[in-house]
Image: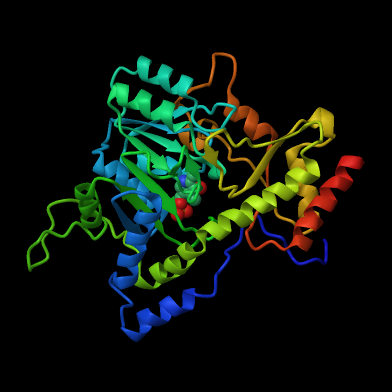
Amino acid sequence: MSQHPRIFLSSPHMSGKEQQYIHDAFETNWIAPLGPNVDSFEQELAAYTGVRDAAAVSSGTAAIHLALRLLDVRAGDTVFCSSLTFIASANPILYQGAEPVFIDSEPETWNMSPYALERALSEAEVMPKAVIVVNLYGQSAKMDEIVAICDRYGVPVVEDAAESLGAEYKGKKSGSFGKFAVFSFNGNKIITTSGGGMLVSNDEEALRKARFLATQARDPAQHYQHSELGHNYRMSNILAGVGLAQLEVLDERVAARRAVFDRYVEAFGHVDGIDFMPEIDGTLHNRWLTTLTLDREKVGFTPLELIDRLAEENIEARPVWKPLHLQPLFEGAKYYAHTDNRSVSNELFENGICLPSGSNMTIEQQDRVIHFINGMLKE
Ligand SMILES: *Cc1c(COP(=O)(O)O)cnc(C)c1O
């Protein structure tokens, strides 16, 4: 094992101002419940995203769950979801006892294929209650096409923007396209509160309901009265303070991640058999993770071999998400591939790799990764 300090895939990057907001919370004893940091974090994130309102919650997963509850997803319903994503995108479908139908990616964004979505909707006997569209690794899905298709069928879009905070699509911020959108502030995301999430929407009434559901659905009575099932999903005022400081440096974090990506492209962009995840015209990819595919015939090794070799150097790399239609948990779920004879998410899973991409990576650390991979390419 290498004696070098570990290079992480994506580690928390504090700005230094977080403790000021935490200090304010302590000074005023706004430790809980909620408080001024939560209010400010919600308002500032909504303003940044260009939506009317935002509700701060305990995780991105909780935010997706609330979105599905607001869309009245129940047992027996179906919900469509991108297949190539982290499991958290779809787990809330099961929380509601509903059935997921998975939609493949298309090659230009690696995100939901409008062709597959159209086929799935045209063949559906009953319309899904929602379509969960993921913006993978910080690249927006083809929102114009997807929103147009969903509008035509009258199905609301939930934008899973957990990985794409700060990204843009045709001049608008990621997270401003669905009926609801969701962000995550988990430790490995582009900004973090150590753990947390946000549900955003232009429907302020719906977000009032979200806040109600997220605080145990307590009726407006002095005694403790409950008519609906609720959750304990709100964000603490201390963590929202961390989020406020992180939001101030979000654009810097996007720039830093994009610079890491640029260095990898400079190093390997010309190599036959290496293809980076594309950034389509009219979008700004936040490059949360630099991801690429390897042609094993041309480069002489597989993604898993590269990951193992990097691990020996104390460098963390990961495969691309295993598609949800291949997960044992979702065995038997319906799946619509991009075309009859091409499943893009399977290809990306087999050939894809995520390289260390943190905004706090030093040039020396970037060089260590690049130098090692260059060495493997020459073997
Ligand atoms: C991280 C992530 C989530 C879940 O967010 P948590 O805050 O960890 O619950 C959901 N969807 C995607 C695509 C993610 O990457």
**Direction from residue 74 to residue 254 in the image, left or right:** right
Q: Residue at x 31, y 39 (%)?
A: 179
Residue 213 location, x and y as percent?
23, 54
User: Toward which corner of the image does residue 47 lie, by quadrant?
Assistant: bottom left
Residue 67 location, x and y as percent?
31, 44
Return the residue found at the far bottom: 27
**Direction from residue 114 to residue 256 in the image, left or right:** right
**Direction from residue 334 to residue 108 in the image, left or right:** right
Q: Up-down: is 164 above or below 339? A: below
User: Toward which corner of the image does residue 129 lie, by quadrant?
Assistant: top left
Coloring applied to the structure: rainbow
Return the residue found at the far right: 379
Where's the C terminus, which quadrant?
top right
- Looking at the picture, tell me which residue is in the foreground, 197 or 311: 197
Residue 204 location, x and y as percent?
22, 50
Q: Up-down: is 63 above or below 113? A: below
Q: Residue at x 33, y 50 (%)?
A: 200
Residue 83 location, x and y as percent?
50, 33
Residue 127 visible from this viewpoint: no
User: Toward which corner of the image does residue 93 lie, by quadrant?
Assistant: top left
Residue 274 visible from this viewpoint: yes
Q: Up-down: is 333 above or below 7? A: above
